Amino acid sequence: MTTVAVARPSTTAEVAEVLRDAAARGHTVVPTGRGTKLSWGMPVEPDVLVDLSGMDRVVDHQAGDLIVVAEAGARLADVQALVGGARQRLALDETVPGASIGGTIATNASGPQRLLAGTARDLLIGVTVVRADGVVAKAGGRVVKNVAGYDVGKLMVGSFGTLAVVTEAVFRLHPEPEARRWVSVEPDDLPDAVRAVVHSQAAPWAVEVDGGTLSVLLGGRTDGVDARARTIADLVGGDVSSTAPPWWGTCPWAEGETGLKITFLLSGLRDVLAAAADVGARVRGSAGSGVVHAAVADGVPDALARLREAAARHDGTVVVVDAPPEVKAAVDVWGPVPALDLMRRVKREFDPDHRLSPGRFVGGI
Amino acid sequence: MTPGVEAVARRAREVVPADGVVDDPARLRTYECDGLAHYRVVPALVVIPEDADQLAAVVRACAEHRVPFVARGSGTGLSGGALPHAEGVLVVTSRMRAIRAVRRDDQRAVVEPGVINLDVTRAATPYGYYYAPDPSSQQICSIGGNVAENSGGAHCLKYGFTTNHVLAADFVTADGDRVRLGGGAPDSPGYDLLGAVVGSEGTLGIVTEVTVRLVRLPEEVRTLLVGFGSTDQAGAAVSAIIAAGVVPAAIEMMDELAIEAAEEAVHCGYPEGAGAVLVIELDGPAVEVEAEYAAVERLCRDNGAFEQRVATDPAERALIWKGRKSAFAAVGRISPDYIVQDGVIPRTALPQVLAAIAELSATSGVRVANVFHAGDGNLHPLVLFDEARPGEAEAAEEVSGAILDLCISHGGSITGEHGVGMDKAKFMPRMYDEADLDTMQLVRCAFDPQSIANPGKVFPTPRLCGEVPGRHKGAHPAQEAGLAEVF
Amino acid sequence: MGPDPELVDDCVHCGFCLPTCPTYVLWGEEMDSPRGRIHLMQQHVEGAPLTDAMVGHWDACLGCMACVTACPSGVRYDRLIQQTRAEVEAEHERPRSERALRRLIFSVFPYPRRLRVLAGPLRLAQRTGLDRAVRRTGLLDRVAPSLAAMERLAPRLTKPEPLPARAPAAGVRRATVGLLTGCVQGAFFPGVNAATVRVLQAEGCDVVIPPEQGCCGALSAHSGREAEAQGFARAVVDAFASAEVDYVVVNAAGCGSVMKEYAELLGPEAQAFQDKVRDIAELLDELGPVATRHPLEMSVAYHDACHLGHAQGVRVQPRRLLTAIPGLELREIAESELCCGSAGIYNLLNPEPARELGDRKAANIVATGADVLVTANPGCLMQVAAAIEGADHPMRLAHTVEVLDASIRGYRLD
């Protein structure tokens, strides 16, 4: 075990300095925001941990333009509180309490709102990064519509800190709805109910499942939302509530369990749920988007293999999001990844010495 | 023809049906420009493959002989992104136009790159779905081109751009390798390479099959045509609507001159005497649309609207949109020549920027018609001139450039949807510094180390890529000789 | 001579014409799109000599004018292609076999009497009276199957009678109308002319049919044979000169479109004549109905003939006339803007693309599931007849005016 040095920069320039220094010394680096998802991906023991919790400012909020600029270490919750003052929201869910902007980008963590607004990749419109060589660069900008140059921001989303260190991000915002309603039901046939809701014209904002429960979020103007909630309730049954169920937007696994992310084409929901039930996995997540999380207590290698088989039948994948180290060591965390060679080439260009979060990501990147 | 191009032509003739390899000079010239006709370069060779195998074989031959290639779909781009390379091959996807699948249950369609945007919607409509990105040229622009340009359209205010609607693609790299990017399901593990490819303007490779998201047709669509005395009033109405938390499917603005052109072209019946019109579309569940409509109607009235008209049937709706979507080409009726500009500003800067454009127009004597996606601050000033009159083209060029500078100084972008292409590469350094551009080109180097995919576009100065994959070394001396000419 | 550089310059290269162009839809290449053809014209205007390649791409144009409808910049492609074709005819040497075929076509089609020989009872047999050269070109083989199918599918209400020189209005006279009988229409579809006369009478029109009228010149004009077209056109104007009619009505779309451009072809002195020209549907719609419509319980797919829809902008009127018939259900055909491939003599000169387009059109028509296909051009009916007959869906063919005639007379259309 080597000693990990922790750097706590408070500006992009300071991050650049840390990275230049690390480059000079050949040190490996792992960036972290609030440390809530540091255990995700393959374990890394870097020489330097760049702790961005000191970069926690919400730099700018332009309500009229529906954008917010925040530093990577800012807590998602703090950003929400600030923009909420103008009845706006950053449509990203805090799936892990205390999550930072940077960590949410790095892991592309998503929750119920993805059905309506997508994930960080869809909301990020500008980004400032520090490269492995310490060069500061930005891409995108402060306007939602912008096709000037490559969308480097998208490469950062979900890259687990292996390409560059994100220090500042610009997001598009959504207006806060007048009202929200949740329709919750334990339908006889869950996949059928999800299907009915997804193909309805009631414009659901989120279609989530937790075990055998289906919960549908509607947002908008009060009259409209009430009417739409009734439409959904007529369709699948259930009760209408103006508060979210307690499990809403959280990961299903407990400490010590293995957390999986399963994706699939919508028509594969039944098959995936059946496979999960077979292996004893508890499922929760965005069934209406084709993305659910699952918790597995034991027998992970076998469960993973069977779930991967099921997901693959529906053009989907299973990734081990979080798990005890001994489980991670025993399984293929990322599963098969197409275009891996091209990904390695991207990595080589951005981080030729392989010093940023080495080994944490797919294919040993 | 360079020896390299000759070699590619030989290979192309082996794999592509005879009429898909074009080298007749008159025919080649018909491909000398895309929708931006004032840049013209005759390609050395045009290849029109019929499937991904043929396309990949041609690209591989290009890579082996280090011959530049440029991809082209319908040739409607407005930034010269598909401008051919004089010593290169133009790879045209217009014969790859099969809609392979429309899967309602999965909300997906799988299409070839040459499929026309509107045809995806036409294929999905019977299932109650449609393809959301709708560039004004949607009746002819291809999905492959949309992917290259990350095309937007009037409805991207609410529904997002091409990048938000493309899930997966079969992709031919600049080496001619075929890889799958993304997946039918969301969040494919690994880097979001597809996210980098969408909007890369053909500089990373060519897509040969695209999986797109289909969106449920809304229960209700309400299209309003609102007449205002001035663009200021219309702009204030837009701000008020956004501030009220309404997200319309689209809010489009046209000023007096643009209205005149559209009216002449398609007789769209826009309000007479209007200094500006807004086309506002609300869609969604009927109850929601009803409530939003009431709010929008009131906000427009409060901000000086003198006429509000709601389309009562699909034909009226189509006519309102026809006026807007034909606006660019329609300007051809009121001016012999014009530049279609495409810039973005923060929406709140609209009044200042419009005033500044008016000022530019007044001082230079160059007429400017304004058409824009007001909801997201995407301006399309149309700068009018007559090439036959000495000095006018230059003056128009200058005004057009000054408008982009305005966009940059207000924290906006030099392009919202038309792309950088050939036309705006020179403006990139005004928006991004050297490090920014260098970082973007790291991606280029990863995908296309030889810099043969649409070279000369997007970036004003190409980055020298660190290493070139080994198999390109040791080319035949004759080819080497050809290369020297190309690069 | 040649395409007008100013008209060429109007094209802004936006590409909106591409998806409406039948040959672009078929082949997906720039040179066979309106934008590409204009580009070739521009090359020629700028000094490039005519080549076989260039001429081939212009020849492949059907002249359907869908691009004119689609063009937001108002490019006059119709004029451009006509000017270009005139130049090609004058300056470009075609291969010998092609010259022979064209010569033959233009020595038969514009002449109603010669056509009638083809249309006679023995027209499908070998004893047509035309020499062997005709058959060697395959011309007859190309026409004959369509004609035979047409004959099986077309409604036969009455035996065609010779048309009178003048037919009086029923009831109060609202207008005096001259009727162009047309070459193909007159020879192959005399029932359409008879129906036209009856409907006009029923709607209060005196109908005048000058016996000396010949071809309107459309085929020649659309093929760049300008002098020939002018000769025909002048004869038509002269034939109607003494008739003192309020309107000259046409029931063949191709004829109507060229007659509405006579002033361009002959000069301003033809303007007065041109202003009187109406398509039959246009005139009936303009006059408004007086005759009672009897119910026709059937579904109708209406096909826009290019020279009616694109060239004359007549789309709404025939639909309005048809839907006014009680019991009649109108169905739209997918890809309605796309040409069926008939395009005057195009299907004789370019049988392969014409057949592909015809099959495509027929499939779209059959997909409507309608009982009857209605259109206003004899060429279109012939073009799709064989393909529709081959489909598994029984369907009749009729001209708009035949449907109206049946409704007014209270007949069934079969």
Image (cartoon, rainbow, N blue to C red):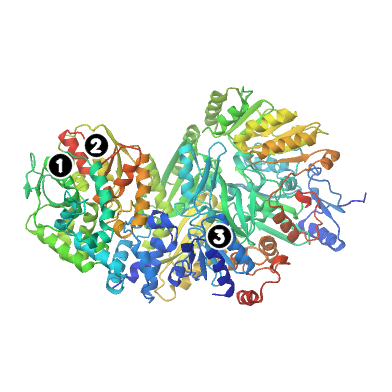
Comparing marks 1 and 2, which lies closer to the viewer?
Answer: 1
Q: Is residue B331 left or right of residue C138?
A: right
Residue C83 in sight here: no
Per the image, label 2 sits on a secondary structure element best described as loop
Disc 2 crowd rating (10 Å Cα; few below 14, some 14-19, many 20+) is: some
Disc 1 crowd rating (10 Å Cα; few below 14, some 14-19, many 20+) is: many
Q: Which chain hosts label 3?
A: B
Q: Quadrant of residue C51?
A: bottom left
Amino acid found under the numbered disc labelled 3:
Gly
Q: Is residue B26 above or below residue A299?
A: below
Give residue C324's mark.
Answer: 2
Q: Is residue A260 left or right of residue B149?
A: right
Per the image, label 3 sits on a secondary structure element best described as loop
* Location of the C terminus of chain B (image quadrant): bottom right
Q: Is residue C303 left or right of residue A171?
A: left
Residue A89: x percent and y percent? 64, 41
Residue drawn at (39%, 57%) of the image:
C23
Residue drawn at (83%, 34%) of the image:
A256
Give residue B419's mark.
Answer: 3
Q: Disc 1 or 2, which lies upstream in sequence? A: 1
* Location of the N terminus of chain B (image quadrant): bottom right
Depth check: give the residue in front, A20 or B202. Answer: B202
Alpha carbons under labels 1 and 2: distance apart: 15 Å
Residue assigned mark 1? C199
